[in-house]
Amino acid sequence: MNNKHHLKTNNFISKFAGIVLSIVLLTGISLVPVLQIGVNGQVQQQQPSQQNQVGLSQVIKQIAEQVSNANPGTNATHVQQILIQLAKQTAQTASQEQAIQEIRQISSQITKFPYGTVSQSLAHFTQQLVSAASSGRGDSSTNNVIQIAQQISQEKANSGGNVSQSVVNKAVQTATGANSNNINQHIRQTAQIIAKQTGVPVEKVEAIIIQIALQLAQAQGKSLTGQYIFQIANQIAKNPNGIFTQLLLQLVKQDTDDGGKNGHTVKIIKTVVKSDRGDSSDSNRNRESGSNNPGTRNPSTSVVSQKPGGYEYKRYEITPPSGYKITVEELRTPSGGKIIFHPDGTREIIPPSNTNDKRLLDAFKKELQEAQIKYNELKTQNPQPTEKTGPSNLCFICAVGNAVNNQRLNDIAIGTAQITGVSAEANQLALNDALLRTANEAGTGQVLQALTNLEADAAANPNSLTKLGDLAKLYESGNEVSANQAS
């Protein structure tokens, strides 16, 4: 009898803690003095060490503002909703004190590293909410928020890690379409391989890969992101000194000891993943010059069908690191959103980049209702050639910053292809690899000089490009290890 009474009392205490915290969160009541719930269920007061401590609701509001400011297009209200729900669940399943501690831990991370992986992960979750609302998935916005908080809590329980790491782990899983923490283990193992190869800290490499995954998900959707991350991991496992290792090493060097204190690293990573969402409308992009700048696909192989009403349809091939080709189709809507159709029949719905513009989001919801009809119409009436986007749809040389215009690499690759008969794609890959190694060994300042020297040699004697062509031939045959040794 006493045991049953004890269980009921504990259950009541747990629920009461959740209710108390909910009141604090919703009303903004300060946590000074902090409420303590004793074993007998009575509320006691703990005298604060400082009378000016900030209430939990204010801490959550500050986190949301910091995340929104660091990640353009992020809705601060959505961040608040997720953190409030996460705190409520922790108060109910553990204790009010733990809920407070975890929110302050997240706050400490965001304050120190506003552009870091925790901040980007919270921004990713808000994008999930927008996508669900735009596509009509989920029962309600509240249920979607609850689901995200539950997933983070479950990850925390499964991994035994702290709340900040659980936020990041779960964000990576949802970004890549994974149902378990296998993807987190793959990323960790890949970081360990590179750390062993290069001597850089595992944690820094891991943070870079995580950011690439989150930014890829925003730019390309989770289906392709999952494929890319697993395939990059496999490529690095097979060839620890290859181009992907060089890419990640350069990004670590660009990050120095920053870790997310400013937006330098994430800005570079966004150019590497070639995000083409929201920077400029397609009507403002140069489709005639053959530019291969980050954020645009190569117009020389891209034919876009523009129809009355502003819908655009594309079909192109993507060649991931594994080498096999994937054909995807894309329908861009007048509001700036996208629907990506994958070979397995799944669709990725990507809302307009400005998620704070309710007018655009409402327009996108209506467009989704007629999207399938428009897709079928444009696909039937406008068959188009495929477009190759490169070995992983990554702009490797963008990792060195703005020092190198990618068009210059394109010109050399095309010129080498004309002389050697090796594909321009393979020549560009070999050139990217060589320049990344120069940046990692001699510094980014030497990359521009090396490229200038190569251009001068080619202008004086076009046959000097045959050495580059020989390297490219190894890439084209799939013999990357030999290409790395000769590079």
Image (cartoon, helix red, strand yellow):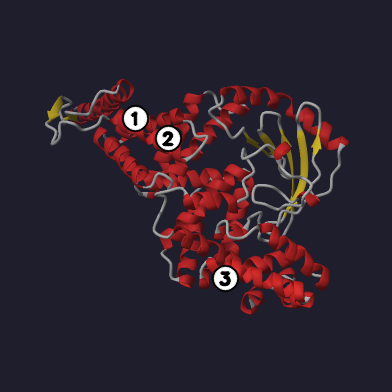
- Residue 381 x, y percent position in the rendering: 88, 35
Q: Which residue is mark 2?
A: 149
- Residue 79 x, y percent position in the rendering: 43, 33
Inter-mark Cα distance, 1 to 3: 49 Å
- Residue 78 x, y percent position in the rendering: 46, 30
Q: Nearer the viewer, mark 2 or mark 3?
A: 3
Inter-mark Cα distance, 2 to 1: 9 Å
Q: SS at mark 2?
A: helix
Q: Which residue is mark 1?
A: 88
Q: Give the residue type that dot 2 points to.
A: Ala
Q: Nearer the viewer, mark 1 or mark 3?
A: 3
Q: Which residue is mark 3?
A: 437
Q: Nearer the viewer, residue 55 or 269?
A: 269
The residue sitting at 14% across, 33% down in the picture is 48
Q: In the picture provided, is 398 more to the left or to the right than 410? A: left
Residue 178 visible, this angle = no
- Residue 308 x, y percent position in the rendering: 81, 27
Residue 477 visible, this angle = yes
The residue sitting at 51% across, 68% down in the picture is 443
Mark 2 burial class by Cα count in 10 Å: few <14, some 14-19, many 20+: many
Q: In the picture provided, is 475 more to the left or to the right than 230? A: right
Q: Which corner quadrant holds the C terminus?
A: bottom right
Mark 3 burial class by Cα count in 10 Å: few <14, some 14-19, many 20+: many
The residue sitting at 31% across, 33% down in the picture is 59
The residue sitting at 26% across, 27% down in the picture is 17
